[in-house]
Amino acid sequence: MKLYTIDTGYFKLDGGAMFGVVPKVLWSRTNPADDKNLCPWAMRSLLIEDKGKLILIDNGIGDKQDDKFLKHYYLHGDVTLNSSLNNLGFSTDDITDVFLSHLHFDHCGGSVKWNNDRTSFEMSFKNAKYWSNEDHWAHAIKPNYREKASFLKENIIPIQESGHLNFLKKDTKFLNRFDVLLVDGHTESQMIPHIKYKNRTIVFAADLLPSTGHIPLAYVMGYDTQPLKTLNEKAKFLKVAADNNYIIFLQHDNYNECCTVKHSEKGIILDKTFSLSEI
């Protein structure tokens, strides 16, 4: 098995929204904001090459949204999903499976693209199966008002209409390759992959733990639909991660790609930060 970091681009979000009830004077120590109170965030995906499979976990915001939508998120940086794949010698046609942690636009927007004359949508990964789960899919196609702006039909419905949609069953390994933890605080049935790699467990943390700045338990995103549930899910996860020295792959951390955590007198804290290539 080989693992690769796929950088799909960077965007900005309001710092207050990213840290919920935590005061700016605290969260800005790790995530300084600009004069508009915006912090930069990564949209980092993970590529798994294993025994004839090329599995992409999440795929960023994509490029099919109009300028009115994208201007709210201040996209920046030179990397894209395609450039990151190409730099590794891969193309979108090589992807066999697209694993979607959840269907918020910054995680699945690259799944679907315009056709050449921009008259309809087509799959960005034409040879791939796309994977979600039944509970999350049902939640996404009939979103609550709070999440409606995050579940965009053009990112989701074409996957089903094209015949590429597959559902992962609960309590099963994904393609016999890795375990999946389901969590509900951020959104219903978010999927968190746990991958065995070089005698370690690497966890693609998605929005359960967006950055090292979110390690303190009270640092929960304002976007989360059930923040108290997130707090409890995160507490349980961090304890297991510290007990077992998990490597946490950070999808949104602008400064750190991976980290470990450890126990301390003050609770679980950041241990080390490093890149995936250093493992």
Image (cartoon, helix red, strand yellow):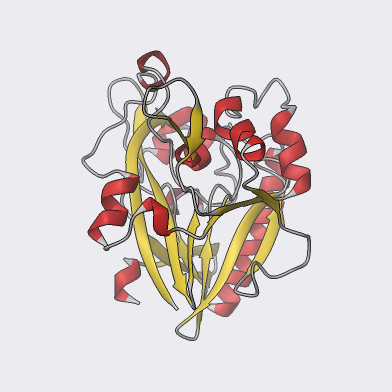
Looking at the rendered image, the quarter that the N terminus falls into is bottom left
**Residue at 41% in and 65% down:** 259
Decide: is 124 above or below 263. Answer: above
Where in the figure is residue 25, as x and y percent of width and height? 40, 34
**Residue at 56% in and 37% down:** 221
Decide: is 142 above or below 193. Answer: above
Of residues 23 and 265, the one drawn nearer to the viewer in this rendering: 23
Where in the figure is residue 242, as x and y percent of width and height? 56, 72
Residue 79 lies in quadrant: top left
- Classify residue 35 as left or right of residue 26: left
Looking at the rendered image, the quarter that the C terminus falls into is bottom left
Where in the figure is residue 43, as x and y percent of width and height? 40, 44
**Residue 80 appears in the rendering:** yes
- Classify residue 40 as left or right of residue 185: left
**Residue at 53% in and 65% down:** 203
- Classify residue 50 as left or right of residue 89: right
**Residue at 39% in and 63% down:** 258
